Image (tube, rainbow, N blue to C red):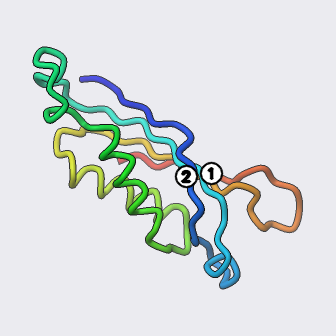
Amino acid sequence: MYTIELEGMDFHAFHGCYELEQQTGSHFEVSLRITTELGEVAETDDVRKAVNYLTVYEVVREQMQRTQCTIERVAQNIIDALHERFPQISQTECRVSKIAPPLGGKVARVSVTLEG
C-alpha cells in the first residue's frame, strides 16, 4: 500500500445553497489523500498500472463542474468517481474548501473532509 496526496487543487465552481452562489460561483480548493495498492507500479515503473495523478486531477475537475448545493455532496461525488475509475484505491480522504464563503463576516474558508 502507498499514499498519494494532491493538495490545493484550485477551482472556480458554482456550488452553494443560494441562487447567487450558483450564478456567480465561488473559489474552491480540493485536497486528496488516496491510499492504494502498490501492485507492480514501483517494480515495473509502468504508469498504466498506477493511480495516475493527471487522471485523478481530471476526475476532480469533472466533479467540480457538477453544481451541487453542499460541499459535502461535492466531496462524496469526488470519492465515488475516483473509486469507480481506480478500483485499486482502498481509501480516499477528500477535503473541499469554499474560500471566503458568504457568511456575513470575514471567514477565510469553510471546509468539509469525507472519507470513503
Image x and y of residue 97, in percent: 61, 52
Residue 96 got which mark? 2
Q: Hey, which quadrant is residue 104 in on the image?
A: bottom right
Tell me if 51 is positioned left or right of 99 in this view: left
Instruction: Read off the residue under disc 1.
Output: 111
Tell me if 71 is positioned left or right of 60 in this view: right
Q: Residue at x 31, y 39 (%)?
A: 91
Tell me whether the residue at label 2 lies in contact with that at label 1, contact meaning CB atoms closer than 8 angstroms.
Answer: yes
Residue at the extreme bottom: 19
Question: With respect to residue 96, does 7 lie above or below?
Answer: above
Disc 2 is placed on an element classified as: strand
Q: Residue at x 18, y 17 (%)?
A: 42
Disc 1 is placed on an element classified as: strand
**Number of marks:** 2
Tell me if 8 is positioned left or right of 51 in this view: right
Residue 82 got which mark? none
Kind of residue sitting beneath label 1: Ser
Which of the marked residues, 2 or 1, is nearer the chain's N terminus? 2
Residue at the extreme right: 105
User: Where's the N terminus, which quadrant?
Assistant: top left
Question: With respect to residue 34, does 107 lie above or below?
Answer: below
Q: Residue at x 40, y 54 (%)?
A: 60
